[in-house]
Amino acid sequence: RVAFADVFWPMYVAGFEGQKRFGTNFMIAGKDGVHPGLAGQTVMAYAFLKAMGLNGDLGTFTIDLKSNKVKASKGHTVSSSNAGEFAFESSRFPFCATGAADSDNSIRAAMNLIPFNEDLNRLTLIVKSATAPKYLVTWGPESKSFTREQLAKGINLAAEFPVNPFTPAFNKVDAAVARKQAYETTQIKTVFHQVLNGRIKSAEDTKEAEIKQLLGIRTTEGKLDVEGVIQATEIKRGLLAQQIREAFAPVTHQIRIVPVP
């Protein structure tokens, strides 16, 4: 089976809606119409991930204020519950995106134009047995008020709290992914397309120390060892991939729920 990702229509609709909301300078496909900024890239990623069948359910925290009982779904554990304060340890991360809500170079802006959080980024809080009309929910550095009806139905913490306890850990993962991607760009564009194709033949042809080192990998006949060069780059790429996995350390966090006077 082959899945089909419709990228055109989400980009077209998001671009139209973006200009209607944020002005004609908002260019979802990039200023040149070919190279999208972060907003356009997010819409494209959304289309691909939806086509891959991801359901976006990252977990649910269910809290009963009357009994003080707390449940957490797979990937999360309850650490403690005490008088409106509930602690958890989580190994499943929400996607955390801050930035301008009206820029075509902002992930956050794209999230305002497509149902990214609703479809792919749901970390749900459900509060039962609430007696007050409204409650103040504090998660990390931010607080926000919700009606008891909203809490009973469930709120998406990932959408309601852009900055949250996962943000520092998420940024570490994001930085590790960026390092790996940057190296892969060098691996493909410089090593594979220039070194292995003979465009860069000697250390005198480059200023990059790593490329000079790779050029030193030779066969017994003194020729460039193509397989050896590929293997060396793959070893480094593997280490960078391992750093991404290591960055996914469990996060401890607290949710505080108090009635609004």
Image: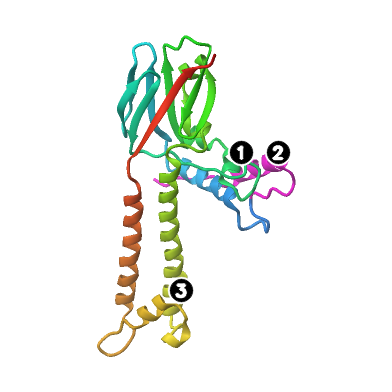
Mark 3 residue element:
helix
Q: CA distance from mark 1 to mark 3?
A: 37 Å
Q: Is residue 203 above or below residue 177?
A: below
Secondary structure at badge 1 equals loop
Name the spot of residue 86 as percent of width and height, x first: 37, 25
Q: Of 100 and 201, which appears nearest the observer?
A: 100
Indicate the amino acid at tag 3: Thr
* Kind of residue at disc 1: Leu
| Residue closest to the far right | 24
The secondary element bearing badge 2 is classed as helix
Determine the CA span between mark 1 and mark 2: 9 Å
Q: Is residue 21 magenta?
A: yes
Reading the image, the residue beneath label 2 is 21
| Residue at image mark 3 | 190
Among numbered discs 1 and 3, the one appearing first in the sequence: 1
Residues marked 1 and 2 touching at CB (< 8 Å): yes
Q: Residue, x 39% and y 81% (percent of image)?
A: 212
Q: Which residue was labeled with disc 1?
A: 113
Q: Label 3 crowding class (10 Å Cα cut-off): few <14, some 14-19, many 20+?
A: some
Which circle's residue, 1 or 2, is located before the other in the chain? 2
Q: Position of residue 108 (x, y in %)?
A: 57, 42
- Any part of residue 196 in sight: no
Disc 1 + disc 3, Cβ < 8 Å: no
Q: Residues within 10 Å of mark 1 (few under 14, many from 20)?
A: many
Residues in magenta, as a range: 1-28
